[in-house]
Image: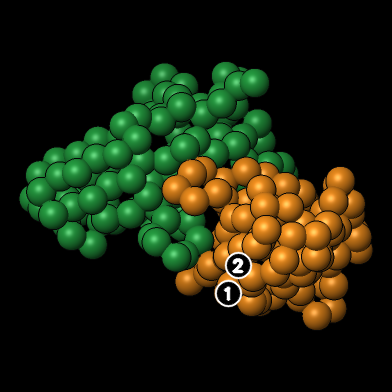
Chain colours: A orange, B green
Amino acid sequence: SQQGEEDPQALSIQEGENATMNCSYKTSINNLQWYRQNSGRGLVHLILIRSNEREKHSGRLRVTLDTSKKSSSLLITASRAADTASYFCATDFQGAQKLVFGQGTRLTINP
Amino acid sequence: EAEVAQSPRYKITEKSQAVAFWCDPISGHATLYWYRQILGQGPELLVQFQDESVVDDSQLPKDRFSAERLKGVDSTLKIQPAELGDSAMYLCASSLAPGRDGEQYFGPGTRLTVT
């Protein structure tokens, strides 16, 4: 079974708007990662946030982590058409040696 | 920039036939992963190698799937016999360290269709 659950499952916004995706998980984690997947392609790593961190930034990406609520959010600011993709959170939960991926949020940026 | 290579990119096979996928990880990456991704879902780990040793194959259907990484470099995933439910994207990834400590680099995947 998959540990993380993304919300919403699908999101459609206008170019230039901000996009926010959420990820909830069930058990304590060591770190949480976000990946992007363009249609029919492999995944690309975006950002990793450790359990003792609350916020990280990378370019137009901002990730927050709330371990008390077992949730994370990914914010993409000033969205572009090229941001159209599926976004997955992946958790490395304590006691495991592997990443467990959620089902993803499909983001569509309309020009 | 170094990339994970996979072949073939697409494979169509009939059920009960054998099929094999190949992966060449980024040079120097000791950890190699095979994932299966069903359309509309996230990747699910099938097997994880550390060098040539399997460290996790708990989700690998061992009655029909096998994986090897003989020299600790490239790897092959085999399905025999293929079933209709095996239709999916098969992704290979590699990392410098085991999954928990860093990012994974994914190949482009092999899209398998079983008819």
Q: Which residue is found at the position 58% from the left and 65% from the top? A: A106
The amino acid sitting under disc 2 is: Thr
Corner quadrant of residue A21: bottom right
Residue type at mark 1?
A: Gln
Lower position in the chain sequence, tag 2 or tag 1: 1
Q: Nearer the viewer, residue A71 or A21?
A: A21
Residue B67 visible in the snapshot: no
At label 1, counting other C-alpha atoms closer than 10 Å, the crowd grade (few under 14, some 14-19, many 20 or more) is: some
Front in this rendered view, residue A70 or A44: A44
Residue B109 visible to an observer of this rendering: yes
Q: Residue at x 86, y 46 (%)?
A: A59
Q: Which residue is mark 1?
A: A9
Cβ atoms under marks 2 and 1 closer than 8 Å: yes
Q: Residue furthest bottom?
A: A69
Q: Is residue A45 left or right of residue B48?
A: right
Instruction: Say which element carries label 1.
Output: loop
Local SS, label 2: strand
Could you tell me residue A51's position as x and y percent?
Answer: 83, 61
Task: Read off the residue under disc 2.
Answer: A105
Residue plotted at (80% across, 65% down): A17
Q: Position of residue A15 (x, y in %)?
A: 74, 60
Q: In the drawing, does residue B23 fall left or right of residue B17? A: right
Quarter of the image with the N terminus of chain B is top right
Position of residue A6 relative to residue A35, above or below, is below
